[in-house]
Amino acid sequence: MITLHRPRYHFLPPRHWMNDPNGLIHWRGRYHLFYQHNPFGPTWGVMHWGHAVSADLVHWQHLPLALAPTPGGPDQDGCWSGCAVDWAGTPTLVYTGVRPEVQCLATGEGQDLLVWRKHPRNPVIAGPPAGLEVTGFRDPYVWREGEGWRLVLGSGFPGRGGAALLYRSPNLLDWEYVGPLCQGEASRLGHNWECPNFFALGGRYVLIISPQPLGKAVYITGDYAADRFTPLVEGDVDSGGSLYAPQVMVDAQGRRILWGWLREGRSREACEEAGWAGVMSLPRLLTLLPDGRLSAQPVPELQALRRRSVRWGPCTLAGSLPLEGLSGDGLELYITIALGSAEGVALAVRRSPGGEEETRFIYDRNAGTLRCDRSRASLSPHQDRTPYEGCYPLQGDRLTWRVFLDASVIELYADGHTCLTTRIYPERPDSLGLALEALGGEARLEALEAWEMAPIWPANGSL
């Protein structure tokens, strides 16, 4: 296995393929993370459920596979995405079997949930209601409501657009179709919605979807009553082009925490040569802003990884400022800048001394956008160079960024409401530098603090 570009403080399996986070649950004081996994190679295949556990959201222990296809069963062609719930004291996975798409249950045993038994009544939902034509029927997300249960499925209606289908049950076994919880227009929100999440937050409700073929995750906040969701505010969960199929859990503290799959930005051949593909985002704490937008910040537990620190500022930014004495591919940055007369600010990371390789994040004050420029991210022909841009409605004159660099992963959190996550694959071993630049005027760097981040894995990258 090739470890170049392999993250050291983001979660990923010891080897092979990973995609969607599944079955997130806080059980008996520990966080359980399941995920879509091909244990036989670094490319997508017949899906199994990988499994890991953590006491602190930071350091993880790999566990044996939780789910594998059962020959002749409703999941014989793959155990696809789903969620986890506490069913009267029994941890229960609700997931999709395919060809055709149906919904199944499995229950866990033991302190570490190492044993999972599939329910003899599978599938508990054997397909869409008769006469209902849909574009998909998968990725269940389940919650308690009143004395019973509700379940939402990713779907869509041909020629009309994506939809989240709502079901109800008294017991997780007998399900009744209620109708669309929410639906969208194909021209704007795609023809099929994958991996829906639906939950209460900050006095409202949040629906998160991954629309096909948009290739990103979208949140919608609004009101929920009488089995119908009324959208009010909409935005991107992450605008960097990498995060997809997120899942949200609630822990014992009542916090809503989100993980997302970070897709590779290199070719299939490069993944096969490396022997691994797919990374999980850092866990993000969700809150709701007063205007209804969704806010995401890294969970505070990640501060346990901080080691040696370097500080800069205050100083004037006029043109480009190389951050001498600060370099690396395993860092956290905290940056505060007063814009002054500048029309924007750029941060260059993973920069070679001559600038042959670098990735730039650019704030445009007039446009109100934050852009990721990967045009020189790597000298490799396998690097995806697509630029990505998100809305960044900065209030006032001051911007605050938190940036996490971890080998091929960059996560940028801007003022609590705009996230850009991207994947890069620099080739040069000296592409480790950083620089700040004021664009079209002068700005003031009020403070920059950087920490070297400790790895969460042993030196060989696996447990």
Image (cartoon, grey):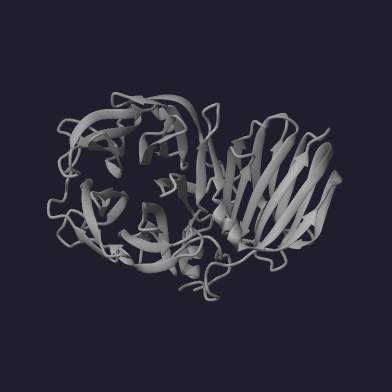
Q: Would residue 457 be found to the left or right of residue 27 on screen? A: right
Q: How many marks?
A: 0
The one of 270 and 127 positioned closer to us in this rendering: 127
The one of 316 and 68 positioned closer to us in this rendering: 316
What residue appears at the point 79 percent right and 36 percent down from the top-left corner?
Answer: 339
The one of 452 and 264 positioned closer to us in this rendering: 452
Quadrant that contains the C terminus: bottom left
Residue situated furthest left in the rendering = 121
State which quadrant residue 452 falls in.
bottom right
The answer to whether residue 5 of the structure is visible from this angle is: yes
The answer to whether residue 99 of the structure is visible from this angle is: no
Residue 451 locus on image (x, y percent): 69, 60
Q: Does 376 appear above or below 132?
A: below
Residue 303 locus on image (x, y percent): 60, 57
The one of 145 and 33 positioned closer to us in this rendering: 145
Residue 155 locus on image (x, y percent): 31, 37
Q: Would residue 100 be found to the left or right of residue 361 on screen? A: left
Q: Would residue 127 be found to the left or right of residue 222 on screen? A: left
What residue appears at the point 29 percent right and 44 percent down from the top-left corner?
Answer: 138
What residue appears at the point 35 percent right and 67 percent down from the top-left corner?
Answer: 39
What residue appears at the point 52 percent right and 76 percent down from the top-left corner?
Answer: 460
Residue situated furthest bottom in the rendering = 460
Residue 263 locus on image (x, y percent): 48, 53
